Amino acid sequence: TTTQARVGTVADRVVLGSGGDAAAQIRALDGVVAATGVRHTSVVVTSFGGIEAATAQAVDPAGIASTMDLGTTSGNLAGLSRPGTVAVSEMQASSSGWHLGDKAHLWLGDGTPADLTVVAVYRRGLGFADVTVSRQTAAGHLPRNADDEVLVRTGAAAGTGSAAGAGSASGADAALAAWSAAHPGTTVVDSAARTQMLGTDLAIGAWLNKMLIGVMVGYAALAAATTMVMAALARRRELALLQLVGVTRRQIRRMVNAEQAGLLGVAVLIGASIAALTLGSIMRALTGSPIPYVPPTGALAVLGGATLLALATTIWPVRRLLRTPPTDNIGIKE
């Protein structure tokens, strides 16, 4: 997501917290080459036979090519200037079954149904939004008439010489600073700072997801440990019989170790196969590649935790059982 946002943001300045017709005002400032107002919202789309919410952005299509590069693979974003049009990401087009020129049936931010013609398909949906419409199409269907941000392309990005670029940058920055001072609540940052803020927000979300997953894994581990300990303790009569017929404690421990190693190997193979199939399908839909990214430390934690859980909840109870005289356990019913 951060890579797509960084590569796809052609603008070198971003005005945050702007409202009203801020893009038009900023576009008229000295040193500003292009300015695109972006309003982040959501829409409801058809997906895999059902409906789901999708990220969306309402943009001013005038000069959009000078401020953002969505990585268009078919069609042209300039088509958004026509009423009743929409551009969608490759992922959304795939899940909704939309192609260039199709009518996309969706519901706008306020729940109003709309049939929009797909005029472009792009690949950087993670960094921007899965659905892109013009401000004209979204007008009256947003929670409030305001830009979340304005992407600004200054002369510094378009200048051909270093001196001209520096002069344009200082002039545009001064003009943007003056405009921001006259509009309380707005902030001017460079595109790198905007991408960094996006990365920070994603990192917080990832931390919360990991915490939730940790709680679920903890419950699953507790349930598995309880089941495995009870299963091991239920073998007391079997182990007592083996001891009475002459099998030594060491041989029993080796037998149990071999059993658990085989079961653990099968369990890891089945679990890895299920994870590979499900994650591969998700990653293909998200990025086009079927190979998921698995952090090495994460893989070691999962495999090590499963191994430790399996051994601790089977071998340790069996060792405790072997310390009891077999005559005490042979009469216990299964």
Image (cartoon, helix red, strand yellow):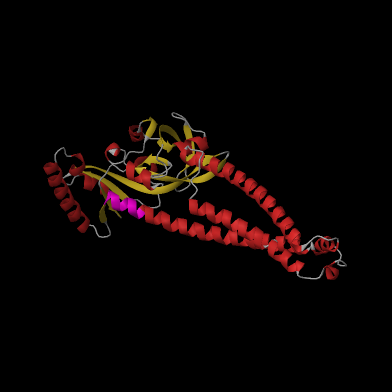
How many numbered dots are placed on residues in this image? Answer: 0
- The residue sitting at the right extreme is 331
Identify which residue is drawn at 44% across, 28% down.
101
**Magenta span has 332?**
no
Closer to the camera, 37 or 296? 296
Closer to the camera, 87 or 144? 87
Where's the C terminus, which quadrant? bottom right
Q: Position of residue 195 (x, y in %)?
A: 33, 50
In this picture, residue 13 sits left or right of residue 267: left
Q: Position of residue 23 (x, y in %)?
A: 26, 46
Judge whether 102 appears above or below 318 on screen: above
Judge whether 166 appears above or below 220 on screen: above
- Which picture quadrant has residue 242? bottom right
- Which picture quadrant has residue 47? top right
In this picture, residue 56 sits left or right of residue 224: left
Closer to the camera, 334 or 262? 262
Is residue 10 in view? Answer: yes
In this picture, residue 257 sits left or right of residue 296: right
Closer to the camera, 262 or 233? 262
Judge whether 141 appears above or below 239 on screen: above
Q: Position of residue 100 (x, y in %)?
A: 44, 29
- Which picture quadrant has residue 246? bottom right
Segment tinted magenta in the rendering: 190-197
The dominant secondary structure in magenta is helix
Identify which residue is drawn at 11% across, 43% down.
163
Is residue 19 in view? Answer: no
